[in-house]
Image (cartoon, coloured by chain):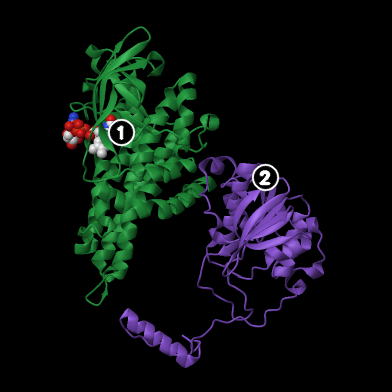
Amino acid sequence: MNIAVLVKQVPNTTEIKVDKETGALIRKGIPTIINPDDLSAVEVALKLKATHGGKVHVFTMGPKSAESMLRELYARGVDDATLLCDKAFAGSDTWSTSLVLSTALKRHRFDLVIAGRQAIDGDTAQVGPQVAEFLGIPHISYVDEIRGVDATHCFLRKKEEKQSMHLKCPFPLLITVLDGIAKPRYMNMTHIFNNASRDVEILDNDALAIEKADLGIKGSPTKVKKTYAKSITKKTTAESLAPEDAAERILAVLREKGGMPDAL
Amino acid sequence: MDHLLNDQHKLVQKTLRDFTANEVKPLAKAIDEGERFPRETVSKMAEMNLFGLPFDTAYGGAGGDTVSYAIAVLELSKACATTGVILSAHVSLCAAPIATWGNDAQKEAYLPGLLSGASLGAFGLTEPNAGTDAGAQKTVATEHDDHFVLNGNKIFITNAGEADLYIISALTNPDARHRGISLFIVEADTPGFSVGKKEMKLGIRGSSTRELILDNVTVPKANLLGKRDKGFAMIMEILSGGRIGIAAQAVGITEGAIEEALRYTSERKQFGKPIISFQNTQFMLAEMETKKEAAKQLLFKAARYKDQGRPYAKEAAMAKLYAGNTTTEVTQQAVQLFGGYGYTREYDVERMMRDAKITEIYEGTNEAQKMVIANMMMKEGAA
Ligand SMILES: Cc1cc2nc3c(=O)[nH]c(=O)nc-3n(C[C@H](O)[C@H](O)[C@H](O)COP(=O)(O)OP(=O)(O)OC[C@H]3O[C@@H](n4cnc5c(N)ncnc54)[C@H](O)[C@@H]3O)c2cc1C
């Protein structure tokens, strides 16, 4: 089984700093990590490879510095890595990003494409499904278990808010996975010394030949009007109460603000 | 220090930091209190191929080097010195001798298991009446047609009872003292081989330290490691390699204690301000950090010398001596900076102070290191 995994390098921070002028994230000086959902996606792929054979190929769109992230994935046992890197890609929204990723994916034949559910710096959860649309293959998002694989189909569990669905889907398909689906492995010493320094394939837009008009800020249909940090206007009051009384108090406040059905 | 590390070393460091934070640190307190060997951690370390780290890929090694091995022991020991020494004893005292002196059949038979971590290794040298004076050992190996029969007692053996494979020193020529010692590869389930008393210790309490009893243990001649009667020189070399591991353990404990002290003194307030704002606290931290860094330089110098194929016995002895002294001193200062809280089991520095002391004792006491260093100086002076 040949598996592609989409990964993204993200800033390691919950405390997001935003450029006041452009509304974009300030990434400079903030240590980066592999997006947690994506690391789980890689783990799922490596596990499938261990039982069913095949290769795992990771793709990322990003700056040259994302190469180090791909090396860390080599150190976990990934077979191939491609970095999609071009000035023209900078500033792309999810639509343009998905176009770039899917164009690169089309150069190969994959049975399964796995993406993380969402990136912690954008939280859109759009790229996976959009890539599937560009590829013209089915997609299932929010997968929290791969129940099995046979020659033609994948058996999955998809998590919804209050229920789970068991699904059967023919290959090729794209899934997005939740980070709880598999605990990512650590880098392996043998891979560090024998795989990690292998070259990463770097493709620019000369290789992908995507219309310039579809790329970057200009090519992106999403226009960010304003990005701002929510300011808290209401004053916080602190009360120390016994658990029972606290519950009563919370209920009363919620009722007062109209956040509770009367039946309760 | 980090500027001397290559990209691969940095990956080892990065992943070991994650591993230590997620898998090792959460257990450190409990295995100390319960004096429990962390078997589950050993399995996880095996999954990462840590037990084969500095060995050639031929028999399943990772293809790393001594520097990366030192990084691994150091990072584990930052949170748990017990976990650090499990790796150090396995790699330096059991797998390395077989990789160095084993013949093809021995390598074939034992290295794949040891390097994958499927089997754990240990080294039995010390005896009740032969510690620093290793040449005074009494365990004998009497020769028969195709085998030797070993009889004797070893004490204080790290990983004993947990290990599957032991390298045991014994006299093949009892009259020749240290010129009559040979090394043997002994499988744990060999009849007549058993583990005795478990030591109750001051520190590294999760590490298994036990007696070995050899009661008519039949070892095939094929398991003689290296040349007969040439064991003493091999032992000296094994211990030199091991000292890099123990120096790494010592530097790791030191770094861990400094991290704790830095955090605590920034948070703890007295006289209306964090205690780190007092100049005495700052000066103590500065000295702790400087000594740690000096110890680290000695450690990585010894490791690099070994990787470059240069003689490194003196460097390894100096690294272990200084790193051991430093960790004993620095962990005590860390407890001092914590005040009464540092003296309680609530805080990690209490355990770190207890763990630190062993690095001045095993794989040669401080005094034994000084003997090695001075001997090398005299030799160098004569040359
Ligand atoms: C937790 C633990 C784990 C161990 N693991 C192992 C292991 O895996 N394998 C193994 O074989 N051994 C192991 N040992 C044994 C350890 O290496 C010895 O304890 C150590 O070498 C010291 O020997 P000794 O205890 O007999 O002390 P002694 O040799 O009796 O020394 C007592 C004191 O006298 C000093 N001294 C001795 N001779 C001289 C001299 N000529 N000049 C100056 N001072 C001297 C020593 O430095 C020391 O201060 C371990 C010990 C411990 C405590």
Label 1 environment density (alpha carbons within 10 Å; few <14, some 14–19, many ≥20): many
x then y, percent, for residue A3: 68, 50
Q: In terms of image quadrants, where is residue B95?
A: top left
Q: Chain A is drawn in which colour?
A: purple
Q: In terms of image quadrants, where is residue A191?
A: top right
Query: Does residue B305 show up?
Result: yes
Question: Which of the labelled discs sits on residue A55, or is there none?
Answer: 2
B193 versus B307 height, above or below: above
Q: Is mark 2 within 8 Å of ligand 1?
A: no
Q: Is mark 1 within 8 Å of ligand 1?
A: yes
- Same chain for the residues under marks 2 and 1 in the image: no
Chain designation of label 1: B
Closer to the camera in the image, B278 or B96: B96
Label 1 amino acid? Ala
| Chain letter, colour green | B
- Residue drawn at 78 percent across, 63 percent down: A134
Q: In which quarter of the image is the C terminus of chain B?
A: top left
- Residue drawn at 69 percent across, 70 percent down: A91
Under circle 2, the secondary element is strand
B49 vs B147, left or right, is: right
* Residue matched to label 1: B160
